[in-house]
Structure formats: structure tokens, C-alpha cells
Image (cartoon, rainbow, N blue to C red):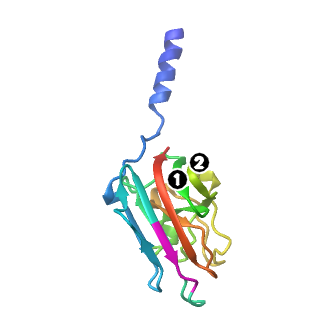
Amino acid sequence: MRVVSFLSGLLLVGCTSTQSPVKFDQGDWRYATDPHGSQVLLDEPLVQNNRVKIGFDRVPRVDKQNNSWVELIYDIPSGNLNGLDSIELTYQSDQPLVIKLSQQEYGGQGDKSYAHYQVVLPRALTPQTQRVTLQQFTRPDWTPVWSKDRGIIKSSVSALYFVPDLTDKAGGRASMTIHQLNLQ
């Protein structure tokens, strides 16, 4: 009986969908900024020494129709979050750090609201590890009323966006380093 119980436990452990830490492959990381003057600040290659390091200078919002934005993007190699329930991140950021789930339904191939599910992590002046479950992600307060909430559809999340929490009104500078990323 104990042998059966032990073997059952091994089977359950083998069925978990925890992935090993993300390897910092240059091909999986990129960045984007608005066409209104926001800039990327890089003193060295984006991916180096088992980390990703970047800075941004975001201009204030131009007008009602033209928002400014900056983002560090991790393209999930599998192209989705199927079988995963949490994200563990070791990071350093001089501003609070927003993690957005880039989901097709809310982006350019969907309703174009760009009101992706997101979570905000606190500022971390030294490396800090945070684990967040997908259940902690919510849509932003500014989500348009016409954008239908379809929930998080794991098969439609193709990337994670890491965004310094700078305001539309003021813009500002920010720097961040991703030391480790685990999709679990």
C-alpha cells in the first residue's frame, strides 16, 4: 500500500507544468516605444550575463488620440501560457513594474483596446523576487466600456510586457533589470 501511495505521489509530481527558469535568449526579448519621441536607453546589449537590462525615457501623452508608451517584451517560446498558472520574477526597477499579458483578443488582432490583463509589482532598488498567479492579473481601470472582457485565455497569451509604471501626464525615465523569470 505504501509503495502504491509513493508511486502515485511520483506520478503527480511528474504531472506538474512547472518550467525551468527562462534562459535569456536574445531572440525572445525585444522592446518597443511609441512614435512620439519616447526612447530606449541602452548602454550595453539588451541581453547579457544571464539578465535583461534596459532603460526608457517616456514622453508625456501627446493628446487624446496619441498616447506614449514604452515596453520590454518577452515573446513566450511556446507561444502561449497553456498549463501555467503563475509567474515568478526576480527583477530590479526604479519604478513600480507592470507585467502585462499580451493577449490576442485585446491587441491589434482583437478589439484594439490594448487593455491587457496586468499586475503591478513594487519598485525594487535591489534585486527582489515576486511570484504572482494569473488570478492576480486584472484589466486596467482605463479599459474602454466597449472592450468585452473575455478573461485570460492562456492559449492566446503570446508575450509578457514589462512596463515601468510611468504616468501619461508626466512621462519620465525608468530603468529595469530582469534577473530571472520562471513560468510555472
Q: Is residue 156 left or right of residue 168?
A: left
Residue identifier under label 2: 130
Q: Tell me if I can see residue 15 in this picture.
A: yes
Is residue 122 rendered to the left or right of residue 164?
right
Q: Residue furthest top?
A: 1
Q: Earlier in the sequence, mark 1 or mark 2?
A: 1
Question: Residue 41: which quarter of the image?
Answer: bottom left
Residue 146 forms part of the magenta stretch: no
- At label 2, the amino acid type is Gln
Residue plotted at (50% across, 55% down): 154
**Are circles 1 and 2 on residues that touch, CB within 8 Å?**
yes
Q: Residue 66 occupies which quadrant of the picture? A: bottom right
Q: Secondary structure at mark 1?
A: strand
Q: CA distance from mark 1 to mark 2?
A: 8 Å
**For residue 60: magenta?**
yes
Count of numbered circles on the image: 2
Q: Is residue 82 above or below residue 99?
A: above
Nearer-the-camera pick, 4 or 166: 166
Q: Quadrant of the N terminus?
A: top right
- State the residue in front, 127 or 73: 127
Q: Amino acid at mark 1?
A: Tyr
Which residue occupies 57% across, 76% down?
172
Q: Secondary structure at mark 2?
A: strand
Residues in magenta? Answer: 55-61
Can you give x and y, in whole percent of width and height, for residue 164 in the image?
A: 56, 67
Instruction: Name the residue that disc number 1 marks.
Output: 91
